[in-house]
Image (cartoon, coloured by chain):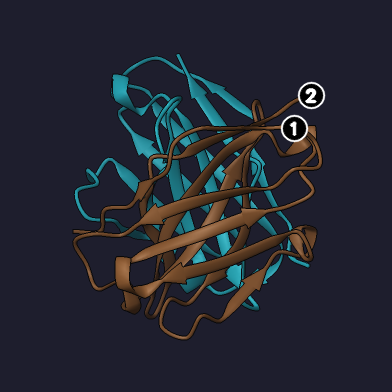
Amino acid sequence: QGQLVQSGAEVRKPGASVKVSCWAPGYTFLNFDINWVRQAAGQGLEWMGWMNPSSGNTGYAQKFQGRVTMTRDISSSTAYMELISLRSEDTAVYYCTRAVARKSRYFDFWGQGTLVSVSS
Amino acid sequence: DIVLTQSPDTLSLSPGARATLSCRASQSVSSNSLDWYQHKPGQAPSLLIYGASTRAAGIPDRFIGSGSGTDFTLTISGLEPEDFAVYYCQQYSDSRFIFGPGTKVEI
């Protein structure tokens, strides 16, 4: 089963960084890209980027280039998303998702979400 | 860059009614790359439709996706209480995913 389990809520001050984890038990971690999507309060879904667990290759939305890094630990089937230079606008729920890439590309499983709050 | 526009912003309907949600792309997109998600408060989004018209596993047949080119539609025939949520269309191209702004379906 494509279950994704994320780390707990985080509180940070502006300028700090945060690293959210996404553990993928129950399926072959290397076979599916992990994408990250966030939702700020009252806003829609925003795609942040992708990471291929097998190669470690990544691709980031232009908005987050230079501030986000997506990595993985193959031994523990865990993906990570680190966001630096946090500002209040980064307060959001962050989701990891499993991406299926066949004839179509879509997100079939989602983590439960991690609330990151940025406040002085 | 492709931009997705969804309409209406909000749809106010009663249980049992038919909901018609629109997703329009700023340029023609592959039907294989247009998906729909449902998002309820306090929960993670969930996949409804992929490839414009294929229901995801376990999705009831009252959810129907259609369309091609620049115009796509999600129809919910006979709203159930659990269907009141926000619905997002999503498109993939050039190694990027883009979400529409969402349509809220409320009672």
Chain in cyan on the image: B
Q: Residue A75, located in which quarter of the rendered image?
A: bottom left
Foreground residue among A67 and B17: A67
Residue at image x 59%, y 45%?
A38
Q: Residue A13's mark?
A: 1
CA separation, marks 2 and 1? Answer: 5 Å
Foreground residue among B33 and A7: A7
Q: Is residue A12 above or below residue B10?
A: below
- Crowding at label 2, few (<14), some or many (≥20) Cα neighbours within 10 Å? few
Q: Is residue B52 above or below residue B79?
A: below
Residue type highlighted by circle 1? Lys
Q: Chain of mark 2?
A: A
- Crowding at label 1, few (<14), some or many (≥20) Cα neighbours within 10 Å? some
Residue at image x 51%, y 62%?
A35
| x then y, percent, for residue B87 | 50, 38
Q: Quadrant of the C terminus of chain B?
A: top left
Q: Tell me the SS state at disc 2.
A: loop
Foreground residue among A75 and A5: A75
Q: Tell me the SS state at disc 1.
A: loop
Which residue is outermost to the bottom?
A: A55
> Sequence-wise, which precedes: disc 2 or disc 1?
1
Do the residues bearing badges 2 and 1 touch, measured as CB atoms within 8 Å? yes
Asked if badge 2 and badge 1 are on a common chain, one would say yes
Residue at image x 22%, y 55%?
B57
Q: Residue B102, located in which quarter of the rendered image?
A: top right
Q: Residue A120's mark?
A: 2
Colour of chain A as rendered: brown
